[in-house]
Amino acid sequence: MSMFKQRRAQFFTRMKNNSIAVIPAGREKIRNNDCEFPFRQDSDFHYLSGFNEPGACLVLIKNNDRCKTVLFNRKKDKSAEIWHGYRLGQSAAVSELGFDSAFDIAEFEHHIYELMDGFSTLIYPTFQNAALDKSLSVVINKLRAGARQGAVAPTVIIDSSRIVHEMRLIKSENEIELLSQAAEISAAGHIRAMKACRSGMWEYQLQAEVEHEFALQGAPETAYNSIVAGGENACILHYTENNRKLQNGELVLIDAGAEYQGYAGDITRTFPVNGVFSEHQTKLYQLVLDVQRSAISQVKPGAALIDINKNAVQQLVDGLLELGLMQGDSETLIKDEVYKAFYMHGIGHYIGLDVHDVGDYGTLENPCLLEAGMVVTIEPGLYVGSDADVDPQWMKIGIRIEDDVLVTEHGAEVLSADVPKSITEIEALMADAKQHG
Ligand code: GLY
Ligand code: MN
Ligand code: MN
């Protein structure tokens, strides 16, 4: 409770005086008739409230430097709880989660009208939640209509996202611990998959191995839909069908991460289905691995992801020229973005409560610089489809190697280092698993 209270206190220091903030919870989504997708709390709401139910809204009020927190949540309901599960209710929201008061969410519009009256500034995630936009517009217009009776509607509206996202970008000690655990559990899932992989398995069966290990280790949810892509499927960046048989002689790319207490792991490894890299696979894999290691070595305070990516592009292009997959001079190939036929995504992203975490990246001319306490992924790749203009021996090879990296005072710490990535280590692990079952 104290961690979430501290965050609310920090949020208050960033609120103007005489303002009211409204932060909505996530909503349940229908999957198909009578069934919902598993509920996942909205990350901003979770960050500030620590409350994991849908049908809720957090209100923060700063009035003459006096701060008040109000939670709207579902009221206790015996029948609804028998059918759908436990609800915390209002009195426990105050005693267990530390809000100053709590009201039934069914009475939101009535109470928010009274709470908002007189405040000049409204802070909320603008244009991100149609239901909240609609409900606030009803309340604001009612306040405007009551002007002659002394009601005062807010005249300044500020997007809350910018404030929360700036806070979320730099991770606390506690968050770093949770991200390390998410990375360690994710690593264990990848190791299990390397050991279990056999030709003839379905991609979804290998996915089950990864996710089984996540759950065994205390992470029942994935941070995103797992990608298990054999052969040419690895060239589809967000391939999630995972429904093809893995073939002897091809590589399999697994991009999968556990979600641990809300925090994401995000690891990619690429390895041979039969446990041994072929000559062409070795050459391309070693190139990506060298680039990934070099990129990680550049992560430190003051560096910019965009510059790390530029260096990665240069190294990938040099490598592809040397291997004969591209021809010409590297400067032109880079300027004309010819390399994008083989490497079309970025070098990495922030990671936290969301796998593609929030936070400002700045602009191309003025990028945001890395700071201690940020956590990023480093994930270069090369993708050679069967339509590439290269010797057929290089075709149907997609490789990405991705780690989760904490920016420290003096450099970087790889949180996902447990899972092997050198060719020798991967082959040894797979050979050992085959021998000893
Ligand atoms: N798993 C999504 C990504 O690597 O960005
Ligand atoms: Mn990633
Ligand atoms: Mn990934």
Image (cartoon, rainbow, N blue to C red):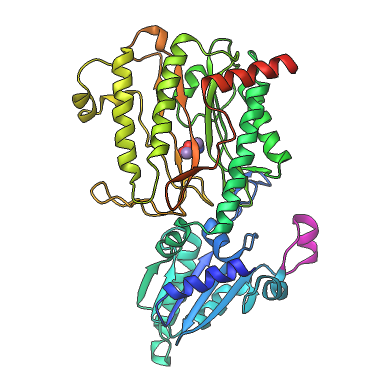
Residue furthest to the front in view is 410
Total residue callouts: 0
The answer to whether 266 is drawn above or below residue 139 in the figure is above
**Which quadrant holds residue 141?**
bottom left
Residue furthest to the bottom in view is 149
* Percent of width and height locating residue 336: 21, 28
The residue located at (65%, 34%) in the rendering is 188
The residue located at (64%, 76%) in the rendering is 102
**Left or right: where 298 falls relative to 112:** left
* Percent of width and height locating residue 162: 40, 62
Does residue 202 appear in the picture of this structure? no
Closer to us: 116 or 401: 401
Residue 77, magenta (yes or no): yes
The answer to whether 19 is drawn above or below residue 385 in the figure is below
Question: Dividing the image into 4 quarters, which one contains the N terminus?
Answer: bottom right
* Percent of width and height locating residue 107: 61, 74
Range shown magenta: 76-88
Residue 236, magenta (yes or no): no
Question: Dividing the image into 4 quarters, which one contains the C terminus?
Answer: top right
* Percent of width and height locating residue 254: 55, 28
The answer to whether 343 is drawn above or below residue 76 in the figure is above
